[in-house]
Image: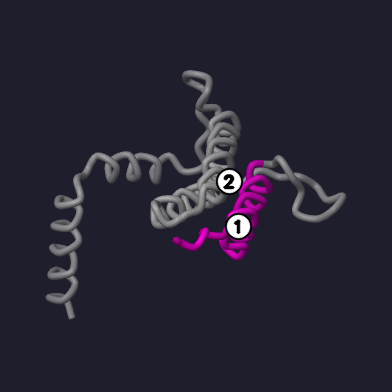
Amino acid sequence: MADKQEDNIDLINLILMLNQNALISLGEASRFAGGKKSENLPHARQTVNMIKAVQERTKNNLTPGETKLLFRILGDLQAKYVKAAGLDKPGEVKSSNPRKDKLDAALDKLSSSDLAKILSDLGKKDAGNK
């Protein structure tokens, strides 16, 4: 008889902490009780991406409860980010760094092998400059 897998409380606390940080960065919650709410979209995006990375790296190793928690938190945060960034309204996108956004879009279009080749070429170039 197989042992029943239990939820990892440390993983759950990590996800809840990242969720709270993202909510603070989205201006949905204040950092301190009674404190002022402020928005930091780049930080919010980074935190959402961290949660997504945890989800991807732990795929097939989570309990049903952990999977459900990650799915719900990611869905909620992504919807809030889309709204806060103005991505739900065509032509009204807020961007704190348009140059970085263009770079991110270009990197997203590269395949893994193309990216590996570029990184390898940069490493060779860097080694040649030493």
In the rendered image, the quadrant that contains the C terminus is: bottom left
Depth order, front residue of 16/103: 16
| Residue farthest to the bottom, as pictured | 130
The colour scheme of the drawn protein is one colour
Depth order, front residue of 78/83: 78
Q: Is 86 positioned to the left or the right of 100 in the image?
A: right
Tag of residue 127? none
Q: Could you tell me what secondary structure mostly forms the magenta stretch?
A: helix
Give the magenta part as a residue range.
Answer: 1-26
| Mark closest to the chain's N terminus, 2 or 1 | 1
In the rendered image, the quadrant that contains the N terminus is: bottom left
Q: Is residue 38 magenta?
A: no
Depth order, front residue of 55/63: 63
The residue where tag 1 is placed is 12
| Residue farthest to the front, as pictured | 1
Depth order, front residue of 61/89: 61
Q: Are marks 2 and 1 in contact (CB under 8 Å)?
A: yes
- Tell me: residue 81, above or below residue 23: above
The residue where tag 2 is placed is 69
- Tell me: residue 113, above or below residue 102: below
Q: Residues within 10 Å of mark 2 (few under 14, many from 20)?
A: some
Q: Amino acid at mark 1?
A: Ile
